[in-house]
Image (cartoon, rainbow, N blue to C red):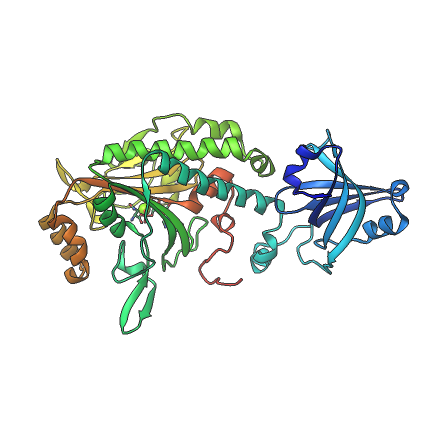
Amino acid sequence: MEKIRIIEASKHIGEMVRIGGWISNKRSSGKIAFLQLRDGSAYFQGVVVKSEVEESIFDLAKSLTQESSVWVTGIIQEDTRSKFGYEIHVKEIEVIGESKDYPITPKEHGTEFLMDHRHLWLRSSKQHAIMQIRNEVIRATYEFFNNEGFLKVDPPILTGNAAEDTTELFHTQYFEYDAFLSQSGQLYMEAAAMALGKVFSFGPTFRAEKSKTRRHLIEFWMIEPEMAFMDQNESLEIQEKYVAYLVQNVLDNCDMALDILERDKELLKKYTTLPYPRISYDEAVDLLQNNDFDIEWGEDFGSPQETFIANQYDQPVFILNYPKAIKPFYMKPHPDRDDVVLCADMIAPEGYGEIIGGSQREDDYEALQTQLEKHGLDIKDYDWYLDLRRYGSVPHSGFGLGLERTITWLSGTEHIREAIPFPRLLNRIYP
Ligand code: 4AD
Ligand code: MG
């Protein structure tokens, strides 16, 4: 007899099959028992009819407890009443591992309780759906950059210098040297772009930020493309094409997951329309000031401001050319204005905030050296990075997309902690 996964049920209608799974829920009466089965690939129903099975099997079905693991043998049939479309008519059940007093019951639980049980919470259908979207975003990312001729490059995680901001570094000891966990692979990706032209990375990054918001993780994953011979405008075109591709692939390949999450698909479809709107930082400040926000030119946007700007559009929006003073040392100043830099943040719709930060990089040796000094960074730590401007410097641009921010947005989830299997948050490193 063939062992199948639930997701393959449509190919086995009328066949007797064996499935290994867990009991996620159960209902029974005197004559029939309905087992909600999950096996990691999908959820569906097992029907046990008293008159069709041995008495011991029916009694066993009625006694099964939540999250017990079982081998189930039965015949796959169509089930027009369920969205999944199939069920299994159970003939035999074998308990593999019993589960007693499973802590996460179908009733409501508080967030801290669920976070303490994250290792079990992952089994719930909503978390399963979010993890499927995460997988799809990662899969589509590799596909997109492959199609566009980028090479995947892996920057190091242990680094000797700050990539973004020295206040958010995780310090560690690297034998006799000081080392830091990577905040961003960008500087190494710039070196890779000078070797390989168009590159992208996908890896974990760490920010020792004391932020406790629904958008911040301490450990998060970032996709960082870097492109030689490309200016900021060309980079924006890649960015919007990439994000629209992610949205389209999630729509195409995660239909069930979007249903479980009750995500509005018509809204998502709008995000595949290109180009995305572009507004300058200056215009954004004017817009906010005209709408009674208390903000001065030169200040960074907080989340209420970002949300207000995003709400003016039906698509993600780029905010261009932020003040130099609030951006990192490596951004190239605007050719006509020294007070702003050639950069953009992409702000997701519906209040999900910044999903991409990117810029054209300073490619002039002297200018970069001056910027490093102004930011109080030690030139000798960045000597290798300056080499990229000593030996055949070229205009180049890149960006970083926050994986979990993007998943939170696409899945319509309230808080970023659900977009990663085991979130690292302020005051939480368990489980
Ligand atoms: O804007 P950020 O800090 O940009 C960089 O790190 C650049 N070096 C990227 C590059 O140009 N190669 O971070 C990029 C993105 C943000 O737009 C956001 O989506 C995400 O990373 N991000 C976070 N996600 C979750 N938790 C945090 N604490 C995050 N900080 C940034
Ligand atoms: Mg940013």
Examine the image and state in which quarter residue 394 appears. Answer: top left
Q: In the image, what residue occupies the spot 41% across and 39% down?
A: 141
Residue 1 visible in the shown view: yes
Q: Nearer the viewer, residue 8 or 322?
A: 8
Residue 326 visible in the shown view: no
Q: Is residue 348 left or right of residue 184?
A: right
Q: Is residue 81 above or below residue 399?
A: above
User: Could you tell me which quadrant the N terminus lies in?
Assistant: top right
Where residue 266 appears, as percent x and y from the top left, is: 51, 27
Q: Nearer the viewer, residue 121 or 110?
A: 121
Q: Residue placed farthest to the left in the image?
A: 366
Where residue 167 appears, as percent x and y from the top left, is: 29, 60
Q: Is residue 219 above or below residue 299?
A: below
Q: Residue placed farthest to the bottom in the image?
A: 176
Q: Nearer the viewer, residue 318 or 193?
A: 193
Examine the image and state in which quarter residue 128 appears. Answer: top right
Q: Is residue 297 left or right of residue 244?
A: left
Q: Is residue 407 left or right of residue 16?
A: left
Q: Is residue 322 left or right of residue 35?
A: left
Q: In the image, what residue occupies the spot 57% across and 56% down?
A: 118
Where residue 339 appears, as percent x and y from the top left, is: 16, 42
Q: How many marks?
A: 0
Q: In the image, what residue occupies the spot 32% across and 59% down?
A: 168
